[in-house]
Image (cartoon, rainbow, N blue to C red):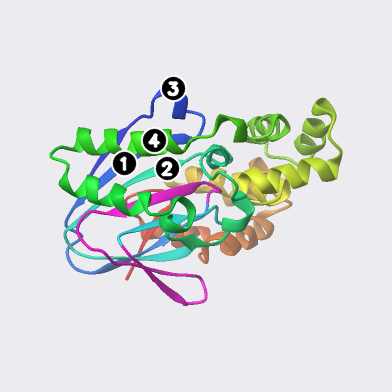
Amino acid sequence: MRVQIAMPCAVLSSSVEYFWLLEGSSHGRTKELALPDGSMELVIDLREARIPLSDRHGRVAIFGGAVVCGPHTEYFVIDNTDGQAVIGAHLKPGGAAALLARTPASALCNACVSPDDLWGRDAADLRDELLYAATTAERFAILERFLLSRIALSRSPHRAVRLALDRLRRQPHHQSIAEAARLTGLSHKGLIDAFKRDVGMGPKRFCRLLRFQQILQAVRREQSIAWPDLAAAGGYCDQAHMIREFQAFSGLSPTVYQASGGRHAHHVSLP
């Protein structure tokens, strides 16, 4: 597998983390767990007009040549095919608010939808443009132009949401939420409502996801792990609490995740 990354222009940088292109052979049909991180993903298959995805309950949905994966708090399963060529945009948590027009991010929580449902016929035209592009650089430029044409700066995330996201990333604890509400003058409920609209879930759930992400990165980075120490550093009551949270978000124990490997921290290969 070969992965290429491109960074967005300044106007899109508050919404898009990066653009990516995945090409190559997976040596037969494989499945992967996609683990949640609260972000959104625009995915366009450049070879097959068929993207099968399964939720944690085994329910299968088949999309055409493109799909938008909303902010997830649950894992889902990607059914890959051999000889992939897939391009996409990884959207920041809360960043999609400027791209979704009147659709709140909360409407896409734990859901995957066709881009046509969000952007109409232009989304199908986007895939056609990408298919006929001659180079990877041209494809990234096409994808960037498409998102630039959809951005609505008046729908940027609420100031309180931006502040809460910044504070939670630095310290994913519940007191950061109350502090963000106090500094922006919103009521606690007002912040929760704005956070759900722009990020797709409540701040407490997002806080739990951030702590889960910290454990993912630590497990991926360290060969030998003192699990009680890791649980304490992550703000969990104890090791059992950390394991329950890890399983709730990934369907796996931390040790099984550590042994499974994968091309990315958020993608776990399945047998």
Label 3 element class:
helix
Q: Is residue 7 magenta?
A: no
Local crowd size for mark 1, using a 10 Å CA cut-off: few (<14), some (14–19), many (≥20): some
Could you tell me how far apart the alpha carbons at marks 1 and 2 are, in whole angstroms?
8 Å
Q: Earlier in the sequence, mark 1 or mark 2?
A: 1
Marks 4 and 1: in contact by CB < 8 Å? yes
Q: Is residue 38 magenta?
A: yes
Could you tell me how far apart the alpha carbons at marks 1 and 3 are, in whole angstroms?
17 Å
Marks 2 and 1: in contact by CB < 8 Å? yes
Q: Is residue 1 visible?
A: no
Q: Residue at x 68, y 31 (%)?
A: 167
Outermost residue toward the top?
Answer: 10
Amino acid type at mark 3 = Ala
Q: Which mark is residue 90?
A: 2
> Which quadrant holds residue 241?
bottom right
Local crowd size for mark 4, using a 10 Å CA cut-off: few (<14), some (14–19), many (≥20): some
Marks 4 and 2: in contact by CB < 8 Å? yes
Picture coordinates of residue 192, whole percent (x, y): 77, 45
Q: Residue at x 34, y 46 (%)?
A: 88
